[in-house]
Structure formats: structure tokens, C-alpha cells
Image: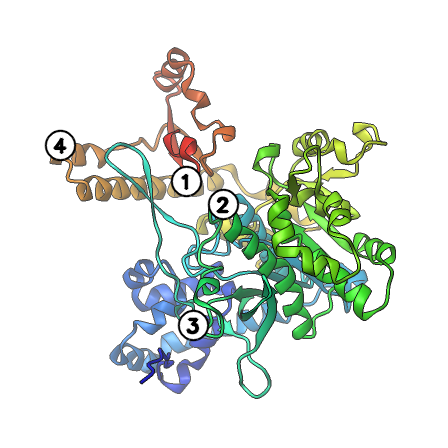
Amino acid sequence: MEFRNIFVYPKYPKNLDKLYKIAYNCWILWDMEAIKLFMSIDSKLFRKCNKNPILFLMLLNDDILNKLSADKGFIYNLEKVWEKLETYTKYSSNSFPQLKGKTIAYFSMEYGIHQALPIYAGGLGILSGDHMKGASDLNFPITGVGLFYQYGYFNQNINVNGIQEEVYNKNNPYFLPLKEIKDANGDKILIKTELLSVPIFIKIWELRVGQNRILLLDTNVEENPPEFRKITDILYVADKEKRIQQEIILGIGGVKALNTLGIHPDVFHLNEGHSVFLIIERLRHLIKDLGLSFEQAFQYIKMTSVFTTHTPVAAGNENVSTDLIRKYLSEDIQSIGVSIEDFLNFGYLNDKHIFWLPALAIRFSSFINGVSHIHEEVSKKMWKSLFTQMHCDEIPIEGITNGVHYSWLSFQLQYLFERYLGPSFYHFGQGSEIWENIEEIPDEEIWDAHQKRKKEMITYIRQRMVKILRDKGFSNIKVEKANKLLNQNYLTIGFARRFATYKRASLILKDKARLKKILLNPERPVQLVFSGKAHPADLAGKIS
């Protein structure tokens, strides 16, 4: 007898259909009116669900649903949010006429869209998520490609010795704003590729991000051998062999997924080097299917590829041993008429035992950028050995300073932006004239919004610390002290990023006497808040 898990979607009143439809578009996770709509149902439960709209709706019982169905005020607000989403998704811009009919494929190992979808680790994912949101606001045609992780990145626990411990929670795709992509007959679509001559099948989940979407690849399907179902389990798994398997699925599997769905990108954007093996699949198509020579295929890929590098130190960039490249990719490379040794040359720096994924991406891209102007200079020095005929200033790496999407603004500041810039300010971010209106926002209103948000932050930190101390069995005296942490009137400096030694979180602690003087300044007191996670394999980062 064989048992299978099945998922049955809940029934709900017909006039709530739009509520369930909007829940599957991530736009509602950053729109104030949409969030207020869900909060109006049960704010406590919505927060408990991490503001995950799908899980939230799944947990509502029939009595609540029937009550909402009969609530004319709620139905009126639902219609308003529905119309707002309809207007947003139909927005068309004339700002990019050169992109009409074009498609950009955006490959990233992680996407930080919202805490409700924990498939991101840090800055790279947040930038990827912001790119997708911003592209949607501007009617910029991007299709994202990534991986769906069964466990994603870990939740952090600090033990009694002050050392980080990792806790992994399973992501159930049916309780997330994801939908499995199926064919016209409603049958599941499986992408086929190979690892070590073993057929691997990949399911595709769709994540709607406003006007655009992200395709998330998943190897956890019954058609795969058990050991390969776990390829997409954990983001940034420490096992190098498992990591290269993920990168093959993302790169080669991602291109195959696009082709299967009839998406033929005009430009491929590689956000960091993790997806660089898409080059192999593109070479295969251009050489085997279209009959181009290797040199022609190389030039075409170079003309249509963009690469963004993030990491400011060489050791932090993705690299693998040449033995792993030979083990996993020799057959693919040789099948397109290229020797493995010739291909490896594209990923070498100085050591022929190490293959650098960013080096391959740089050599196959016509546009390369760092994520700030300072990072531009750092990257030019770091990758100088790839451009031996150029002076450092001539190296074609540009700096594009990271921005953040307006969804990271507090509701208080979003409200001010809508009042003074107009309700659709996010559609016109590339125009300088709209930002001149920021000068019209009174300083007092900005300060008031800031103070309200600061108070909310302090309250959150206190509540979080109280819970941590209680869970660890600390005395009531210590718990009570945590209830009085931080002062709203002090200048608060936050360090919130991944804990890696090169980010130097503890640098401010080196000169203790100077730090004490700063913190205890009677006229301008300062307080510090540190937050972040270290990679599970980074012991030094955990201790710092």
C-alpha cells in the first residue's frame, strides 16, 4: 500500500474570492492598504503568521470567513485593495521604449521579498528582492530565476555561552504565496537535467511580485532519487559538493525552465556568480541547436550578459576545486565541442586548482558592476588579473550604488511620501523632478515619523529580549532590566548585517576608553544595537 500527501485548498464564500487572489501577489506585503485589510481580520494572528497572507487565510475558520463575507465594510475595503492591485499591475510606462517586447532574465541564489518567504540570507537577497519590486514599479520587464529551499536559511539561537546555534524550519510551499506552474492541461511541468549522468527532475514554483514573477526551482519531487531531492533543502549549504549541485540546478536548470515556458530573454543578469553555469546551457543551445561556432557563441553571450559582483574580498567570492568542475560538468562541456581544459581557463585566476565562478561570469559579460563607487575601485583591484592589458582605471567595472525599495520605509514615512509626492510616487523613481517635492515635507513631520518608528523598534527589542531571557531561565531581576533597555532620546546606531570577520562588527569595541566616552556623553549620549547572523560554517563569525 502506498501513501501520498495531498493538499486540499480550503473552501470560502464566493465574495471573498478576490481576497484569496490578492494574497498570491507579493505586492500586498508592502502596500499599506492591503496590509491594513489583512490586519483588520485578526492582527494578532497575522503577526503570529509572520504576515504570511496564505498561511493566515488557511488558519481562518468558517465562522470568521462567513462573518467577513457578510461584513459590508470589509467587502468595500477588499474591493478598494483589489482595484488598487488591478491598477498597479496594469500600469504601463513610456520611460523605457527600448525595452518594449523585451525580457530580462534575472538569476539570483536568494530573494528577500519579505520575511513571510524565508528564502534569503542577507544583503544579496534583499537587493535581489528590491530589484524585482522596483522593476515592477517601473514596468520594467524582468523574470527572476532562483531556488525554492525546503528549509531556506536558518533561524538563530544564541546559547548560554553566547555562541550562535542554527535552527532550521521547514517551508511548506502550499502555505506560502507560491503556485506550482502547470501546463495547459493542468498537469505538472518537470524540467529534466542531469547530475553525474543521473536524470534530475525540477518542479517550478511561481512567485508573483507585482507585475513580474520569480521562477523558483525545486528538486524535492518523487521522481528524483532521495539524495537528489535534498539539493534545494538549505540556502548556502556548507557542503561544497551540494553547493555546486545547487548552482548547476540554478544555472543550467534555470535556462531550461525559461525555454520550457517559452521565455527567451534578450539579456541575462547574473546577480553574483552562483548562477554562472547558465553559460554552459546557453553555449549548448547556440552551438548545438543554432550551429554557431564557439567564438560566435562566446561573443553573443558576452553581448547579452550583465554581471553584478557584491563581495569586497576575494576569499568571499564563490570558488570550487577544479576536480568538482571536472566531476560534474565535463560531459556537458565536452558535448558542445569544447575541451574541459579550455573551459577551465575561463575560471582561473592564479591557481589552476581553483575555479572562480565570478571570473567565468566576468569573462562572459559585457557589463560588470559593483554595488557602490567605493566597491567599484575595490573590485577593479580584486579582478585586475583578468585584465592584464589594461590599467586599473580602464577595467570595465562600474559602480552602481545600492538603493532600497520604498517597501522598507515605515508606514509613517510612506504616508508622508504619498501626501507630498503623490500616491503613485513609486512609478516615477527615475525622474528627478518628483524628488524635489521631498524638500516640501516639513522637518517636524519627518522627525515625528522617525520618533514613532524608533519607539516601536525599542518596544520590539525589549519584548524580544524579555522572551529570550525567560526562555533561558534567567532571573526576574535580569528580565526586568531587559524591559528597560534603550532610551528613545539617545542617538541609536545600528549594525544589522551578516556577521563575517571582514565586516568588522567589533571594530568599534577596540578602543574601549574612547567608546565609553562616546556612549556616556552627558549632552549627546549614544547607544548601539547589533544584529546579524554568521554563516553556519563560519566559526569566527559566530564568536565575533
Whether residue 425 is visible to the viewer of this picture, yes or no, is: no
Q: Identify the element where label 3 is drawn.
A: helix
Figure label count:
4
- Residue type at mark 2 is Gly
- Looking at numbered disc 3 in the image, what kind of residue is underneath it? Asn
Q: Which mark is residue 533?
A: 1
Residue that label 2 marks: 122
Which is more N-terminal, label 1 or label 2?
Answer: 2
Residue bearing the label numbered 3: 77
What residue sits 71% from the left and 36% below the top? 349
Which label sits on residue 477? 4
Q: CA distance from mark 4 to mark 1?
A: 28 Å
Q: Earlier in the sequence, mark 3 or mark 4?
A: 3
In whole angstroms, how far apart are the C-alphas of marks 3 and 4?
Answer: 46 Å
Residue 444 screen position, x and y as percent: 47, 38
Q: Are marks 2 and 1 in contact (CB under 8 Å)?
A: yes
Q: Nearer the viewer, mark 1 or mark 3?
A: 1
Quarter of the image that includes the C terminus = top left
The secondary structure type at the circle numbered 4 is helix
- Residue 185 lies, in percent from the top left, at 57, 88
Q: Residues within 10 Å of mark 1 (few under 14, many from 20)?
A: many
The dot on residue 455 is none
